[in-house]
Image (tube, grey):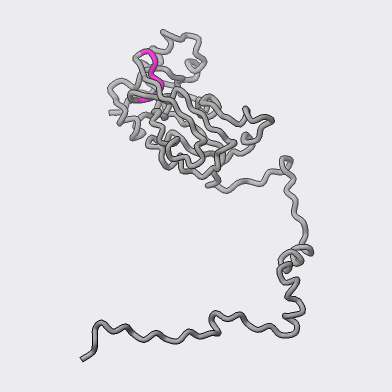
Amino acid sequence: MSDQNSKPERRPIDPALYSPSKKGPIGKFFAPVAGFGVTISSMFRPVVTEEYPFKRTPTQPRFHGRHQLNRYADGLERCIGCELCAWACPADAIYVEAGTNTPDGQYSPGERYGIVYQINYLRCILCGLCIQACPTRALTMTNGFDDLVGESRESLIFDKQDLLAPMLDGMLAPPHPMVEGTDDDDYYRNEITGPTQAQIDWVAQRRPDDPTLKTARPVEEAAK
């Protein structure tokens, strides 16, 4: 009867697995300069210089560049000021302050919106953790990188207006009410296809000089 508490015998360690290999005469001769092998081999390769910015090399499709705050199809902002992106940032490069939406100042669906949004690109490491934490897909990263160079430290602190996506043709600039008969869940499910005539009339009554009134295209069907 075998003893269950007895430990199995350990196999002897093969010294050839851990002992350094012995060098021959040639190996001993080149040992002092062996660490420069990569350097010496690269000295004879042709030099490839990218003539930036005169010749631009396209970035990869999933390249993480400058951030962008996106909008819904009717022009309302996606950011709800939840500050999850700031909490997820390992470099503490994002600063967010939330504001409260009002009937006369509806900037995003729901109750809150990002009234202050700043990204300090002196700290940002472009890791992408902020866009993974965003619950409304408000913050994404573009392929652009030219803007991440400035002449002063202040120019590399991007404010909300620097990060907001441009108004596309057909959108209506906020603030304006949400699409009639909808709630914030309809927006989060991307069921909004554009501004309605009621939204356009609301802006025309309060801001008749708004330039987006000329390009806004009303949609017939609202989200249900």
Q: Position of residue 149 (x, y in %)?
A: 65, 35
Image vertical order of residue 110 relative to residue 93, above or below = above
Q: Position of residue 64 (x, y in %)?
A: 54, 43
Image vertical order of residue 137 relative to residue 6, above or below = above
Number of labels in the image equals 0
Q: Quadrant of residue 29?
A: bottom right
Q: Quadrant of the N terminus?
A: bottom left
Q: Position of residue 82 (x, y in %)?
A: 38, 31
Relative placement, left or right, of 58 versus 78 is right
Whether residue 4 appears in magenta in the rendering, the answer is no
For the stretch drawn in magenta, what is the main secondary structure?
A: loop
Relative placement, left or right, of 178 versus 21 is left
Relative placement, left or right, of 94 versus 24 is left
Camera-side residue: 161 or 187?
A: 161
Image vertical order of residue 195 relative to residue 43, above or below = above
Q: Quadrant of the C terminus?
A: top left
Image vertical order of residue 132 relative to residue 220, above or below = below
Write the residue at 41% across / 8% down: 205
In magenta, the rendered stretch is 104-109
Write the residue at 75% across / 54% down: 48
Q: Position of residue 190 (x, y in %)?
A: 36, 33
